[in-house]
Amino acid sequence: MKKLTAVLLSVICAGTVVLGAGCSTKTNSLNSKSSKTNNSFSNIRGMDISSYISVQDGFDAMNKEENTDTYGFKDFDGKSIRDQKFFDFLAKQGMNWARIRVWNDPYDENGNGYGGGNSDLKKAIKLGKWATKAGMRVLIDFHYSDDWADPARQTAPKAWKDYNGDADKTAEAVKKYTTDSLNKLLDEGVDVGMVQVGNETNNGIAGVAASGDWKSNVSKVYAAGCDAVHSVAKKHDQKILAAVHFTDPQNGNQLGYANFLDQARVNYDVFATSWYPYWHGTAESITDDLSQIAQKFGKKVMIAETSYANTLTDYDGFDNTVSEGNNDVGDGTVFPFTVDGQAKSFHSAVQAALDVKGKNGKTAGLGAFYWEGTWNGLMDVSGLSGDKRTGAIVKERKIWDSCGCGWTSSYSHDYDPSQTNGTAGGCVIDNQSFFGPDGKALQSLKAFSKDYDGTETIDENLTVSDVKVGDSDEPLELDPDTELTSDVLGTAEIHYTNGSRETASVDWDSSDISAYEKARKNGSYGKTFTINGTTGKDNEQVSQKVTLLHPNLLKNGDFETGDTSDWKVSDDSAGYDIETDSNNVYKGHNTLHFYSDSDFTFDLSQTVKITEDGDYQASMITSGAFTGSSDYAYISVDDTSKHDVLNGWQAWNKQSTDTISAKAGDTVTIHIGVKATSKSWGAIDEVRFEKK
């Protein structure tokens, strides 16, 4: 899971694993209970609970400071639940697996924790024993780092820093660390059924960077970790699956990773992915992606991480991953941001995995894990302002640092410089927890039940606060050749007083649509129309402004032909291509995407003939990020040019030139292009030249 996102460009064993049997040297009552009650690898309805201890420590610190007992986790009736009772409660709802993160040494030289749960092996054993006693199986998630590991950072543990990314030395260290840690977990009676060899390892693992076909670098590390898992399993006479874990499944990237693993003959059992609906597409698309891997390589597959917001309200005063205007849209966000939507989204993730079939037509998907559904903020400051709010957050920050229950602490910067004081702080997913800001269990926990089928609705008694149509207050702009229909106008968003949000259908006024269509056919370009409607839920009145654009004089300005044949290419040092149906597409199916491992420039141009006197303007839509301080994208009309610096992934920006006056018969040339240093990336879409 990543708090901040970026487009990460990369590409990647299959083998048949035989888990041997041997003589177990130790029998443990915890293991025997779990094995008898829940020894299945199918229909996993699990959750990552890695931060539970640190969050509970934070609640205890709040209670001590305020001389109260109100802070803490509670069941549906508001009764306090903690430690074993807490895990028993989760198991009663149907949670059958616990995923537990393990960092090698998440502390500085003075013993100050890096935050994020301070997730060391000692905590993993404690959590694992509670989970096992509750009848759950356990997935151990080795990050092979002292802090967060994801595609943007795979920082080697401090103890391995001197290896400088050497694959052979790191592989040997991973083998020993995995063996020693797993033996300790099993000896303590933790029912480990699966082990992740790395976490979201798209671009590297344990300080070893992924490059080429991976055989000479990261595959050595994967192989060492998987072999250690199987050796320990054989020693303890247990079946333990070795899993690899990647993310950013869109665009078929993960089939490439699986190919690389297969070529290197890495002996793993389960191919796991993260699937966050607001980043990674629909549930159907993840089923398709995982099906390709299951059928081609004969592997089991699963979703190792997913989550969904039950409201867009931030409770603890530290920005959330999903909030109003931030990661709150995406192809996969098909459910409302309500408690009911949270339940339905998790159910859809489990079902998406279970729908995967292998070569033999049998189910190859194991199920899904919800990510950190017990990670709560400490206080609800959403209703506070001024000095009261500031004072409450100062109090929280002290505890986030001391108990490690925030995203990261102020002590982590020396180990991972990307964790600046700006990122140190609280919970980034308090609105994706299965427990409310008061610690009380939400009804969305019903989604863990094996009998939950997603058809029932959780009644939340929501009160409407606002109804919105469209992504902004700006009019919907349509080309003259686009017919205005109810589908084009879209749906409405119902906003509730508690910060929840859901989508509602709209009955759009047919007479308003007819008036627009009449104007469109008559060529009334440049005018703005108001289309009224009524929502199908709560009968709320809504309206949408629609601007009828002038014709775009450019051919293929949206790159929907799938090529650049209508453009003249010059100053070309590569770095661009046409990308289809990806998260880099602003509108339609295609976009002009750019990226290169080396410095690059390109220029595309078209010359058009003016047919009518008037003022004209060129524009383009961009997103992405540059790595150099003097990098830029540009659009120009003859001598009129505008530069664009880009604002991030899916941070779409419309860049327009100044208007120019032109007469019928004039010719003008429009240029678009990029001048960038290596590893800059982004997209250009919807390039237009039109009368204003």
Image (tube, rainbow, N blue to C red):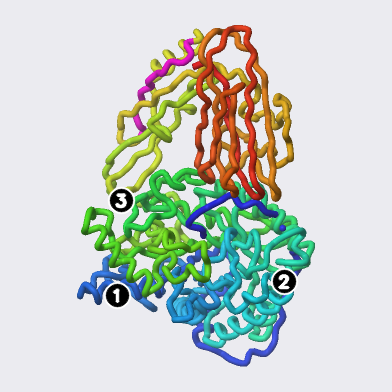
Q: Residues within 10 Å of mark 1 (few under 14, many from 20)?
A: some
Please identify the quarter of the rendering in which residue 163 is found: bottom right
> Cβ–Cβ below 8 Å for labels 1 and 2?
no
Q: Position of residue 368 (x, y in %)?
A: 54, 61
**How far, Cα to Cα, is label 1 from label 2?**
43 Å
Q: Which residue is mark 2?
A: 167
Labels 3 & 2 near each other (Cβ < 8 A): no
Report the magenta residues as a range. Answer: 524-536
Earlier-in-chain disc, 3 versus 1 = 1
Type of the residue with mark 3: Glu
| Residue 468 vertical placement versus 208 (above, below) | above
Mark 3 to mark 2: distance in Å?
Answer: 53 Å
Q: Residue 533: say if magenta.
A: yes
Q: Secondary structure at mark 2?
A: helix
| Disc 3 secondary structure class | loop
The front one of 435 and 213 is 213
The residue that appears at 41% across and 72% down in the rendered structure is 404
Q: Nearer the viewer, mark 3 or mark 1?
A: 1
Q: Which amino acid type is marked by label 1?
A: Ala
What residue sits right under mark 1 in the picture?
Answer: 61
Q: Residue 238: percent from the left, percent from the top?
A: 63, 81
Q: Which residue is mark 3?
A: 460
Q: Amino acid at mark 2?
A: Ala
How many marks can you see?
A: 3
Would you say residue 250 sits in the magenta stretch? no
**99 up-or-down from 313: above or below:** below
In the rendered structure, the answer to whether residue 381 lies left or right of residue 257 reads: left
Residue at (62, 26) in percent of width and height: 557
For disc 2, the neighbor class at 10 Å (few under 14, some 14 to 19, many from 20) is: many
